[in-house]
Image (tube, rainbow, N blue to C red):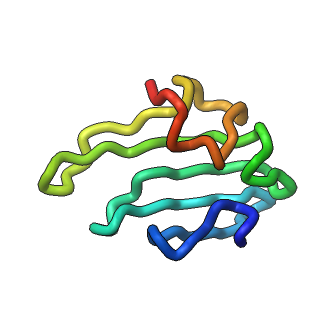
Amino acid sequence: MSGYGLSASVQRTFEVDKGHINLFEYDVNGNLIYYGIAYGSTQASDVGWKIQKFVYDVSGNLLSRHWANGVEEFVSVWNDRGSLSYL
């Protein structure tokens, strides 16, 4: 799993489902921050991810969800998720 940017600093989960890789990254409060999906052979450093970012208020209530680069397409890099624009 280390090839997918998974570390012990933030809770992350990794699963393969129906030929896709699904990655979930949570903050320290257990809120989902990033969700990514790619085809099974895609590496975290490859273009080929759909990435969604979740935004919460201070109470942990979900305020919004946004797609990387404003598109729900397999065009992003998982390892770049923190520096992408979410529209």
Give the x, y percent position of residue 82. 51, 43
- Residue lying at the far left of the rendered structure: 59
Q: Which residue corresponds to the image point at 63% horizontal and 69% vertical from the top-left?
A: 14
Where does residue 19 sit, x and y in percent of width and height? 80, 59
Q: Position of residue 59 (x, y in %)?
A: 13, 55
Which of the image's four quarters has the C terminus? top left
Q: With 24 as the anchor, is 41 left or right in this view?
A: right
Residue drawn at x 20%, y 56% is 60
Residue 33 against residue 6 in the figure, above or below: above
Image location of residue 21, percent across then percent down: 71, 59
73, above or below 43, in the image: above
Question: In front here: 9 or 22?
Answer: 9
Numbered marks: total = 0
Q: Quadrant of the N terminus?
A: bottom right
Q: Is residue 70 left or right of residue 4?
A: left
Furthest toward the bottom, the residue is 8
Question: Please, is residue 49 above or below residue 21 in the view?
Answer: above
Residue at the spot 47% in from the left edge and 71% down from the top edge: 9
